[in-house]
Each structure stands twice: as C-alpha cells, then as structure tokens.
Image (cartoon, helix red, strand yellow):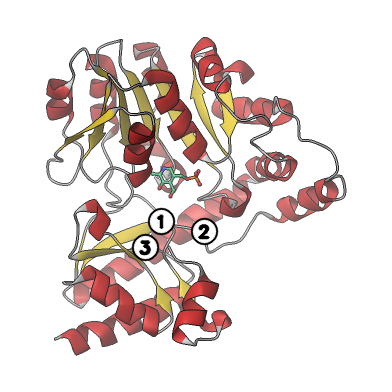
Amino acid sequence: GRPTDAVAREFGLDPASIVKLASNESPHGVAPGVIAALAEVDAASNIYPDFDCYDLRHAIAADVGMAPDQVLPGAGSSEIILLAARAYLDGTRKAIIPQYGFQSYEGAVRSVGATPVFVPVKDWVPDIDAMLAAVDDDVHLVYLASPNNPTGTVLPRAEIERFAQALPPHVLLVLDEAYREFLAPEDRPDIARLFQMRRNLIVMRTFSKIHGLAGLRVGYGLGDGELLQVLRRLQLPFSVSAQAQAAAIASLSDSTFLERNRVENESERARVAAALEKAGVRILPSGGNFLLLEVGDGPAISRELMRRGVIIRPVANYGLPTWIRATIGLPRENDVFLGALDEVLRAAG
Ligand code: PLP
C-alpha cells in the first residue's frame, strides 16, 4: 500500500486524518514490552547485531517446539521467500505458485531466472491435485500460503497434510504462515506432523502481522537444520537488526497481547463482513486480518477512496481487477472505510 504521507501530499489531506488499511498491518501497535526492549537496544546502536540471532532463535524454538538450529530468522519473511528461491532455483528450473499467490513469490522466482508455473485455484483455494499434476523434474519449489494473501482463503489442515505427503521429495515446499496466528488455534496446521511427512519443507512466519512489528523487518523460516544452513549462507550479513531481534523476543513472550489481537481481529472482521454483505458487496471468507471484496472497477474505487482519505489495496496486478483488499483496522477505522465505500459505491451507481 502507498505510504500515508505520499497520499496526503497528492490529495492535499491531513496525514493524521488518513485511514490506511492497505498493507495488512496490525492496528494494535506493539506489545508493551517491545517499547522497553527497543529503548535498551537503541542506546547501543553503535554495536552490530548478533549475526547468529542466538537469543531470538532460542526464543522462537521454545515457542514453536523445535530446536534452535531449525530456526532461521530473516529481514521479514520476505527475505526467506527470496533465500528459498536462490537456494533451490536457477535458469533451468521451475517453481509452482498457486493462482492468486502472494506477489513476492513470482518476483523471487524470476529474480533468479527461473520460471513460475501458475496453477489455477479451485473455489478460490489452491488446487492440490492440479499442483501435484504440474510437478515434473524441473519443478524444485512450491510456494503455498494459508491463509493466503490477497484472497484470505484458508487451505484446510488435512489438505496441506495431503499435499506435504504427496509432493515428490526433490521439491522444496515453502509453507507461508504469515497469517497463521489469526486462525483459531484448532485450525492451525500441525507443523510437527508436516515435518514428519517430509524433510524438504520450510515453514515461514513473520512478526509483521499479529505482532505488529512490520516496520522492524523480522520473520523466520523453520525447517531441517542442514537445509536452513544452505539458505543462511546466501543471507546478507547482519540482515536482522538488533532492534528487530530484541523486539521480536519481547513480543513472543506476550501471549496475552497476541491473543487479544486475534480475538479483536476476528470480531471486527465478522462485523465488517456482515456490513459489507448487508450492503450487497461480495466478499471471500477470510482467515487473515483482511478481506477481499468485489466492488466493480477496483483501481477506480481505490482512487475514489483515497481521495476521501482511505487507503486500501487494489489487486488488479493479481488478475483481480474487480476486487479490492481491505485490512481490518480498529473499529473507528473500519467505520470510516465502510462509510467511504458506501459513498463511493453509490456514486459509481
Ligand atoms: N507472506 C505473505 C502471505 C504476506 O502477505 C506477506 C506480507 O504482506 C509476507 C509474506 C511478507 O511479510 P514480511 O516480509 O513483512 O514478513
């Protein structure tokens, strides 16, 4: 999504009045402990971060129930997306991306000269059988997100397991769980089971979404220790800042903050969805902190909303020109969005 200041300049708006629901950022700020942790590290900004992310790897390992050498932190999960492509692909290889898969996957694949193979979704969720049928000796990587961005759709646990089991061993499966924490606990994939099924698997998570640390850039991959070493050798030195490491550790320990964010997202998402449905706007079921809604001319509606100080995300670049994606904000922000959308849709007839 476009930065608030840029939109304010273009439309002559007060930046403070702008509601930004464009990048699936958390509206709940950061956990209280993060502020204190950052203050401590800020004063030592003359010192390089721990390149090994020792404390962070141990904190994540304890949180997910894996070993510290099975954790690779990165500058956001974006870095892990790219490292996977660099480690597994080259100009002779292909990677499978489900239709409507997160846009960075294609960029990562193309950046190493490899070829993306887009497999159509079925009822808006990745089609496991079609993806399996698309695998050949040249396919070495599959990116799969659940919940997916921008659709928000969730691939059931059993389907993810069926895929992990059936995908040939030479293919790296990158399971992107950027929005995992927004799912009810019982709907989250059992990754211990997935790792029992295959070694060639990286599970990606991020601190950018429910933890509210998007500005600090920190995420991680989970997987086999030797496999992660291959990715790690391709990383820039010190790619995860000291601030990012300290904030992530502090945030992990605040389960109350995280659970409250999940519950508030769930109730606001339901409220916004109900309001949209009542207004006759088609939406997709979402497991994330955002909704995909069909509005007609997505880019034009987006521009009209922007004029009214509401930034959402048009998704024409995903081949979805009639849809827009709106992040779930605070109740007041969601009301501003719903009001502006109502006005814009009425004006558009
Ligand atoms: N994966 C998905 C599905 C996303 O939606 C995003 C960000 O929007 C990312 C990965 C990358 O997030 P980050 O690099 O901030 O961890």
Task: Examine the rendered structure and indicate whether residue 184 appears above or below residue 212.
Answer: above
Q: Nearer the viewer, mark 3 or mark 2?
A: 2
Tell me the residue that label 2 is attached to. 26
**At numbered mark 2, what does the secondary structure look like: helix, strand or loop?**
loop
Badge 1 or badge 2: first in the primary sequence: 2
Q: Amino acid at mark 2?
A: Ser
Badge 3 or badge 2: first in the primary sequence: 2
Q: In the shown orientation, is residue 121 left or right of residue 2?
A: left
Query: At 23% across and 22% down in the image, what residue appears?
Result: 162
How packed mark 1 is, by other alpha carbons closer than 10 Å (few <14, some 14-19, many 20 or more), is many
Q: In the shown orientation, is residue 231 left or right of residue 161?
A: right
Q: CA distance from mark 1 to mark 3?
A: 7 Å
Tell me the residue that label 1 is attached to. 289
Image quadrant of residue 144? top left
**At numbered mark 1, what does the secondary structure look like: helix, strand or loop?**
loop
Note whether ligand 1 is within 8 Å of mark 2.
no
Query: At 54% across and 33% down in the image, what residue appears?
Result: 220
How packed mark 3 is, by other alpha carbons closer than 10 Å (few <14, some 14-19, many 20 or more), is many
Tell me the residue that label 3 is attached to. 269
Q: CA distance from mark 1 to mark 2?
A: 8 Å
Q: Amino acid at mark 3?
A: Arg
Identify which residue, 241 or 10, lies in the foreground.
10
Residue 101 marker = none
